[in-house]
Image: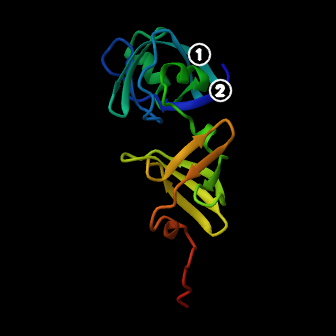
Amino acid sequence: MGNLVLIGVVGNYFGYKGEFNFLLEYKKIEALPDGFKVKIGYSPNFSNEYTIERFQKKNNRAIAKLTEINNKEGIEKLRDQGIFADEEEIQKYNDEFVSSNTIVGCKVINIANGEALGEIVEVWELPANDVWLVQTEFGELPLPVIDDVVVEADFASKIVKINIIDGLLDLTHNRGAVDED
């Protein structure tokens, strides 16, 4: 397996034949095919390989069945452990999937004047839209990932071009802060 990303954490068993549910870390994961390989453990380095026999997404949660486990006791042993998968393999079955590893480190450019605003340091997956946290010279800017703002994202070149909408730069922490002492 190549670059492993955390896709969820083993939750409760679901039924008595080894199915379990988990919260998906990436809402852009829509499908994982039968036979898809994952690693389960407390970290990618301390994990064992398993094969997904069945995967079903329900909103931001999923129900899965592993080939190697056929009872609830087997799932109980894996409970609260991370589920890791190869980033490139996930992308084969989920066209819109982009991991945080790919986004973090991108330079953010103002499309209007070509000015470099900063670098993405964190990704937040929120219900309405994702937010990319950009470290600027003025502090951290929570950048909403919406069509009106993110104009172009070239992850291969690590460049994101944005449109500055009214009030966006006012979100920067420390920008124009007043010392009230």
The image quadrant of residue 111 is bottom right
Distance in Å between CA atoms under marks 1 and 2: 10 Å
Instruction: Decide: is 149 above or below 83.
Output: below
Q: Nearer the viewer, residue 53 or 15?
A: 53
Q: Would you say residue 43 is visible in this rendering?
A: no
Dot 1 corresponds to which residue?
Answer: 49
Q: Residue at x 58, y 63 (%)?
A: 140
Give yes or no for contact between labels 1 and 2 (Cβ–Cβ under 8 Å): no
In front of the other: label 1 or label 2? 1
Q: Which mark is residue 46?
A: 2
Tag 2, which secondary structure?
strand
Residue 1 position by quadrant: top right
- Kind of residue at badge 1: Glu
> Is the residue 33 above or below the residue 132 in the image?
above
Q: Which corner quadrant holds the C terminus?
A: bottom right
In the rendered structure, which amino acid carries the disc numbered 2?
Phe
